[in-house]
Image (tube, rainbow, N blue to C red):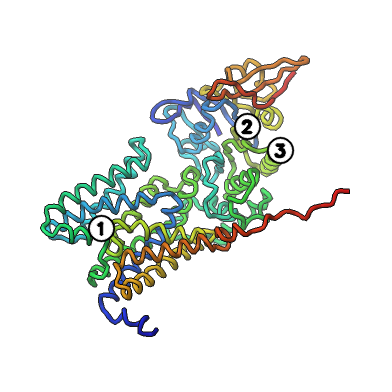
Amino acid sequence: MAVRNLWAGYDGNPVLEAVNFQVDRGDMVGIIGPNGSGKSTLIKTVLGLIKPLRGEVSVLGIDGIPQRNLVGYTPQTELVDWDFPVTVADVALMGRYSRRGLFHRTTKEDREAADASLELVKMFDLRDRLIGELSGGQRRRVLLARAMAHNPELLLLDEPMAGLDATAQHQLLDLLDELRAKGATVVLSTHDLSCVSSRCDKAACLNRRLIAFGKPSEVLNEQVLGDTFGTHLLMVHLDGQAYALQHHTHPDGTPEVDHSDHEHD
Amino acid sequence: MIDFLVEPWEFAFMQRALLAASFAALVCSVVGVFVVLRGMAFMGDAVAHSSLAGMSVAYFFGGSVFWGAFAWAVPASLAITFISRRAHLRLDTAIGIIFASGFAVGIILMSRVSNYTADLFGLLFGNVLGVSWGEVMLIGAVAGGVLLAITALYKELLFTAYDATMSAASGIPVRFIQYLLPLLVGITTVASLKAVGIVLVLALLVTPAATAALLARRLPGIMTISVITGLVSTVAGLYLSFHADLPTGPSIVVVATGLFLAAMLFSPSKGVVWQAWRPTTLPPDQATV
């Protein structure tokens, strides 16, 4: 997957400005940046949901319209209606729906692929549960199963870690590693610096422009993080190590330190 | 007892009413499931009310009231979707504009007709006992068309209703579906106007589907129960109307509401009554050693 001089946004107002980078097959790339930095916009542009204002996106060496069957996507969970009366199995099966045409019912092959996908994310036993009855981590895995159901080569995950506790995050990352071992390429957006620095092959630091792209150990330094997060990030030096603290400013103006995210020497 | 059950159907007008109201209830119960899930109740209500303009124009010039309503409902449904998508207005704002403007035009036109009150009453509250065989067939054909479209596009409608972003990413023509569903809702309300009238069509659209949502877990089950509820309400409403000499449309709505209340109180999984009685499920207290 490659992005060349990409400008994209809504209603003609660019959110992304001149973004350039390339993802190698089999890599796991973490896109980090503050809210409004264009992480979701970037993912939606790669998916073909947003037309680039300028520049181009190519997926698996094919320019222009993305090959839907080669790409799997999970949206931010807040964008999903969890009260909808469908079961885990129904949602996984939706991953097989693309362009089936009028009147077409799902086939045995579709159902087997959806079940295999649920096995993969260890949700098969809960296949008859309604999605509203699932925990946060289980919901995330159902969305992943749906994205995996048509065996895509590239997975685009929008904030897959948000709202998960540390254990669930690591289970999810282990699962992504398993999928990569089978040949998948993973691009995910996150606020979580420690996950990117410890688990991703490449980090893309985004704040409307691409601030840096490369191995986490090389690009996640004070300079880059400062440029990416600006005042959203507080650098604390303690015992010869630098800790990056992300904090969000509340409407009443009191800053709240969220959590310690990343450390480096 | 046999007389009670058989007598109404000895009259041709009751047979026609049964068919017309059943077609309307059938299509409303299916479309209503999407309406309830997507929170589109007032969209259907608005199309029905604004159709008064089309009906009045047709009435004024002596044309078919049905086609007048149809000709108004199609652009009205598309306009609501278009306004809310393009003008960056909330959907309920777009609905408000279409709702009131069409209704106002309709009332103005109707006021120019000599027996204003009686005719307006028929349009507002329906007159299913006065339905002709031609109208029965028309309602059946329109209901059949809507059901055919839903069958053909069931997966697309379901997926888009559940998660539009992901549907678009999967290559489903989401924009087409997002215009189509309100259009189907609009056409459905028109098919039901003769049975229950402009004011009460909302009940036929929402109540059976809401009842079913209390009784079934998954979408196919909800649709089945919604259809059963809609048809039972229609038949029972016609009996009530015939034997107690009550207006037909409102009788159907009252029965449907009764079924909804029963489901709300006694649904096995979501019933208010059981929830009040249900003991809290805690593991047995461990004796501390």
Viewer-proximal residue among B38 and A222: B38
Position of A36 relative to B245 (above/below):
above
Looking at the rendered structure, the kind of residue marked 1 is Leu
Looking at the rendered structure, the kind of residue marked 3 is His
Q: How many marks?
A: 3
Q: Nearer the viewer, mark 2 or mark 1?
A: 1
For the C terminus of chain A, the image quarter is: top right
Image side of residue B46 versus residue A23, left or right: left
Mark 1, residue position? B124
Q: Earlier in the sequence, mark 2 or mark 3?
A: 2
Task: Kindly indicate whether the residues beneath marks 2 and 3 are on one polypeptide chain.
Answer: yes
State how far apart marks 2 and 3 are (Cα): 16 Å
> Chain letter of disc 2?
A
- Provide residue A39's location: percent of width, then percent of height: 54, 30
- Provide residue A249's location: percent of width, then percent of height: 57, 23
Which class describes the residues within 10 Å of circle 1: few (<14), some (14-19), or many (20+)? Answer: some
> Chain letter of disc 1?
B
Mark 2, residue position? A29
Label 2 residue SS: strand
